[in-house]
Image (cartoon, grey):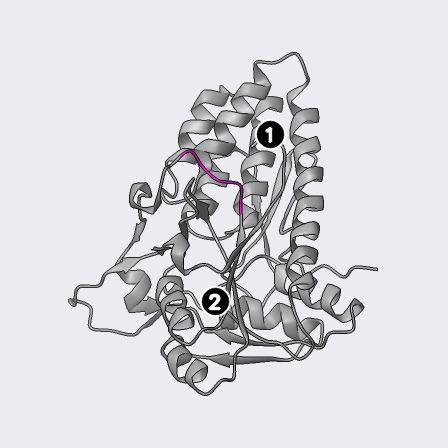
Amino acid sequence: MLRYSPLFWPIQLKGNVIYILDETKLPQKEVYLKAKNYLEAAKAIKEMKTRAVGQVLLVMYTFILSKRQKVNLEKVAKAINATRPTLAFKVLTDMVLGWDKSSAPLEKCILGFLEMLKAGRIQQARDMANLLKDEDVILTHCNVSGSMPLIAQFAKEQGKRISFYVTETRPYLQGSRLTAWELMRQKIPVTIITDNMVAYLLSLGKVTKVIVGADHLTQNGDIANKIGTYQIAVVAKYFKVPFYVLCPPPSKLKNGKEIKIEIRPDDELKIYQGIRLAPKEVKAYYPAFDVTPAGLITKHIYLKVRNV
């Protein structure tokens, strides 16, 4: 029986309230925020209270809630699309608006899509596990919402023992706070490293494969993922370590040059959980994502979901 990380499906719709696992509070606390309308949901996305698959779930549940509340869905779509520019929200919002114009009930369409999404994510993890070997040591960056523990479970079923190195993933520390936490919960061997240790680690031959997620996939196979992914791909290519990407369905963009990179506020680099890390007056630059060209990717592991 599969054991899911809380991050695998971190959003729930109960009645007319959306419950959002606040990923900024992990691993110290498992706290759920409440969103009662589309503005509160958009705020949670903008503030990175949820990310990766959590954002997809939140978008879908927000449309269900807004339809029940008789809110104009075009207005909802506009608010969601304005939250984080690098993510392909427009693919999702256009899909939902199309469903709303069809004869089928919108809520039924969305819930059916979410069932396919869940099955697709499970199959994606299985597909990745099939490519692993016994005693593989995997380096991962950021967090792929419960996928790494699933991959490890499928690998174990196949008689493969695997372990992980996880980058801290600065400045939000999604690697050390989220990925390491969810792997440890399932007793999967994991070691944290800082982001600037990757080249040295690979030079020692301590990593056999790199697996990362992607927030955006373009038509030519370029991906956008958490800042730092690009340099890991370059180093992996240099040391001939296979580099795998767990991908969402592609957007309509032709290549990575067309992806708009989100620039986060300066204080997200200078302050962490209320502690000032840098002089108040110093400038900071925080692009939240970078683009990894398709030529650096060994294989795309696709999420197979219809209607996107």
Tag 2: residue type? His
What is the quadrant of the C terminus in the image? top right
Task: Identify the residue shown where x is 62% and y is 23%.
Answer: 68
**CA neighbours of label 1 inside 10 A, class few (<14), some (14 to 19), many (20+):** few
Across and down, in percent, residue 226 comes to 41, 58
Tag 1: residue type? Asn
Q: Residue 307 carries which label?
A: 1
Examine the rendering and report whether any part of residue 83 can be seen.
yes
Task: Tell which circle, 2 or 1, labels the residue nearer the N-terminal end.
Answer: 2
Task: Identify the residue shown where x is 80% and y is 67%.
Answer: 157
Residue 46 forms part of the magenta stretch: no
Image marks 2 and 1: residues in contact by CB distance under 8 Å: no
Image vertical order of residue 227 relative to residue 187, above or below = above
Front residue of 130 and 291? 130
Task: Identify the residue shown where x is 36% and y is 38%.
Answer: 254
Image vertical order of residue 89 relative to residue 101, above or below = below
Residue 229 relative to residue 188: left or right: left
Residue 249 forms part of the magenta stretch: yes
Across and down, in percent, residue 12 comes to 66, 44
Q: Give the range drawn in magenta.
A: 248-252
Front residue of 252 and 63? 252
